[in-house]
Amino acid sequence: MKKYIYLVFVCFFTGLMLAQEKEMPISLNSAIAYAIENNYDNKIAEKNIEAAKKQKWETTTIGLPQIDGKVDYQNWLKQQITLLPAEITGGDPGTFIPVRFGTQQTMNASVTLTQLIFDGSYIVGLQSAKTYLKISEQAREKTALATREAVINAYGNVLITEESIKILQSNRDILQKNLFETQKIYENGLTELEDVEQLQITLGTVENNLNNAIRMKEIAYQMLNVALGNTIERKLILTDSLDSLVLANTDLSLLTKVFDVENHIDYRIAENDKESKRLLMKLEQSMALPSLSAFVNYGANSNADNFNFFNTDQKWYDYSLLGFSLNIPLFSSLGRTAKTARARIELENAEIKQQEIEQRLLLGAEAAKSEYQLSIENYDTAKKNLSLAERIEKKQQIKFFEGISSSFDLLQAQNQLYSQQNNYMQSMLDVVAKKAKLENALNIPIK
């Protein structure tokens, strides 16, 4: 019996520990850091950087020595016949004798070293590989900034949903109490049926909203898990509250921060795009330059009627060759000129695009500052309005049960309260979300 109790205790304790391990307490800042390491897009961005580094080395090796080995083996299933004048063996003039030259089997082994000496396209290729690596690194940085904003929004949506559930549950409880008391008053003949029915309608609407909020809560957690890079079933415990996030994200100093547009990731990406177009034009220009390469070859061959090439007494005859190859483009019917001109136009378009991006970034920064300031002002206003709406609704409840006001007046006060509750929660989320948007617009790095 003791063993049975002990076994049950161990199983229960193990299950409890496993359940605790699956839970993931997380604050907003730690969620951002976690997502940058584990988010799907960030993982792909890291892999792209690794691929860019490999491509850079791949391009570099084109100009390094290349060594190739080659082994050829030939076995004449039926040797070729060569006809020789019969006169050389004393035969009749004008006649021929068939002769087989060489052995039935031949093997040749060689090693060739090649070295690129000069090629204009190779130099441009090296520069392009560096630019491609920079593009991958900038893409990772932009992905990280987008991940920060996505996690902030997803984290805030979860908190909003949880807070909505609490408020709706409180509203439901108050309405149930009001409905119960109104029904008693109606049963005593002191109010009309319309007052009861009006409260029933309001209660039904609140209960529907509550049920929807409960369903949306699960979806909000799943969306946050996706943003973090988790499976959607991962149990999350959010350690930050809406109030603490609003307090931490209210920073008016951001409104006076000087915006350095040239340091913005989008501007640097445009700059890099312009550089890639310049290199493409340079590549087309390099096609008119000559290219020079050299090679050294060493090999040996052996001949035999039987396969005995690996015998120690088998004779091998070695050979070696040194050579150079010079390729000089002479005339392309103006094809290279057209390609260079087209590449120059692409470069000019990239310059125009960069100017447009610069102006858009300046405009975006000013708009983000304005939206952030408005979100703070809306939060302050919503907080005051909520306090007023709560007082008005309480006064209307008192007046209604004292018979001074109608159910319509109470309904208006309740709807006004519910509207201000939603406005207040949304204003809290807006402060957090608009600050994240402003930080991206100003290219504030992730801490």
Image: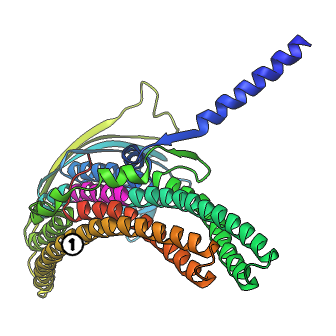
Q: How is the image coloured?
A: rainbow
Residue 133 inside the magenta-drawn segment: yes
Reply yes or no: does residue 443 show up in magenta.
no
How many residues crowd mark 1 within 10 Å: few (<14), some (14–19), many (20+)?
Answer: some
x and y, in percent, of residue 444 in the image: 20, 55
Residue 208 location in percent, x, y? Answer: 67, 72
Along the line of sight, which residue is nearer the eye, 198 or 358? 198
Residue 70 in percent (x, y) is at 37, 46
What segment carries the magenta color? 132-149
Task: Answer with left or right where residue 342 lies relative to residue 186.
Answer: left
What's the residue type where badge 1 is placed?
Ser
Q: Name the residue under label 1.
A: 370
> Which quadrant holds residue 249?
bottom left
Can you tell which quarter of the image residue 133 is in? bottom left
Name the residue: 26% across, 71% down.
Answer: 374
| Spot occupied by residue 86 in the image (x, y as percentages of width and height) | 40, 62
Point out the image quarter for the N terminus: top right
431 vs 415: above or below:
above
Q: Which residue is drawn at 63% across and 78% down?
A: 403
- Does residue 327 appear in the picture of this structure? yes
The rendered magenta stretch, by its main secondary structure, is classed as: helix
Residue 84 in view here: no
* 321 vs 96: above or below: above
**Front-most of 101 and 377?**
377
Q: Residue 65 or 71: which is nearer the viewer?
A: 65
